[in-house]
Amino acid sequence: MPVFDFNQKKEEAVKAEKTYELVYSNEREANAEHPLMILRDEDGVMKHHSEGMFEAPSKGTAFIYDGSSEMSGEKSTSHDILCIDARFENLVKWLGENHIMVRLSGQRSDRGYAVYKILETGVAVRGAKLSGENGFLQFMIGRLLQSEAPSDTEVDLDEIEDADNMRLTSIQSITDYLQCAGSTLPDNIRLWARRNLAVAKSTEVTPEERRHAQRALSIMLNIQWKNTDFQPIDPEMAKKILDEELYGLENVKQRIIETIIQINRTHTLPAYGILLIGPAGTGKSQIAYAVAKILRMSWTTLEMSSINDPEQLTGSSRIYANAKPGLIMEAFANAESSNLVFIINELDKASSGKGSGNPADVLLTLLDNLGFTDNYVECNIPTSGVYTIATANNKEDISAPLMSRFAVIELPDYTLEEKRVIFTKFALPKVLSRIGLRSDEIMISEEALDEIMEIFKNTSGIRDIEQAAEHIAANALYRIEVNKVASVKYDAAMIKELLN
């Protein structure tokens, strides 16, 4: 195995052809079976943790293992890259170009040394900038593992300690990110980013234009794009979550389970979202949050009753000094993912815009899954990973175009008997658990339950009986603490006095 002087000058190196094989993988975790790369190591020189540095592209395709760092007296040796996950090719080239010292974790395999982890050592060679000092390297590896393999075409290189806290804000980190991950971005976003980076670096535009371009880049590149291969969801687990959150509504639960089974078969989201229509207080929002929990996706809420101008959704143009993204773009940015559940509350209020347009028209572009364009970002945003759940009280107030974008589920109001079960089995136990009361500290007679149902017999939904459970439990806690009693038993007269 050839011996290299670790500090030899770049111009003295011998250029080599690319000899490694690209592996087009969509694995979400790296391990010995699915490594980031495999290095040649016939002599078994490399250890489980091996420090060194990758060669720059002009010097070949090898990793220079610094055996001397192991205090074993060994010399530095060169190890060719035999194959590499295509998503990580540009990252390795970036590490080589910037002379960044790294520590590889791996193990020997039949083919060579299988690398499944790369960590920065914090040692800069010849004063090189080390972006890894603020978590950039781990941020990159995490992002690349969650991205899809780039297409099997050549990528132009000119395209431009806690990963969870890393954000791309500086021009340098944005530039490095595009060099390392550009090929994994959707084509239109990669080209958009190159143009905006040129503006952000330009001295021929105003400082305001540079600031807007840099802010837009930070928003877009901090979002994980193109990961739309949805993993299977256990229908039994989904049913358990729904049963814990909802009493009855078996037809609604079945429709949701049908959606889960469809996702499991196709690994994609259904073409239509869900529109839940029913009287106020019937649990529509609760169902929406339960679905987001089942899908294991980030979620955001749009309150249509507070949106009266389409610009609130689409953002404002960068020609204005106070320009900013719209609520939809901000939702993507806050979730840092293009896979997102949009919960649109009070969809029947979407057609009552007071501004220069109709907010409902903006929603149509989001719901069609053809991409959404924010006026501030000025880029078509893929929406194939967006699932929409809307709620409404009045079906008649929703326009036909909006209605046609949803699978409609109508929720009937609860019967008195159903409200009785919800109060005793769901609402009251949940309140007791939250405020720390035991079930034997509060007792409600059958006559008292009858009185509760009588008081709320003409109300729709279950919000009133949930508030009643809260009121009764708080009153019981007060009596126990102030009157120093072991428990409180409510009869019909006490309930009538308390709730009326």
Image: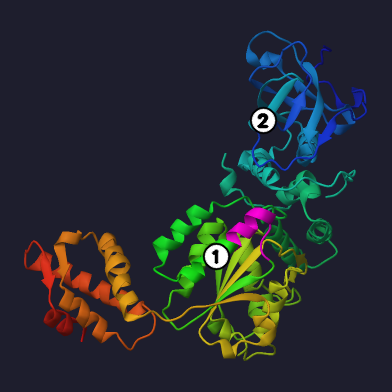
Asked if residue 144 lies left or right of residue 17, the reply is left
- Residue 439 in sight: yes
Q: x, y (%) of residue 326?
A: 65, 73
Magenta residues, dominant SS class: helix
Q: x, y (%) of residue 400?
A: 67, 86
Q: Quadrant of residue 357?
A: bottom right
Q: Are marks 1 and 2 in contact (CB under 8 Å)?
A: no
Three-letter residue code for mark 2: Tyr
Give the labeled residue for mark 2: 116
Three-letter residue code for mark 1: Ile
Q: Classify mark 1: helix, strand or loop.
A: helix
Q: x, y (%) of residue 231?
A: 63, 50
Give the labeled residue for mark 1: 256
Asked if residue 149 lies left or right of residue 258, the reply is right
- The region drawn magenta spans 259-270
Q: Quadrant of the C terminus?
A: bottom left
> Where 266 sits versus 109, above or below?
below
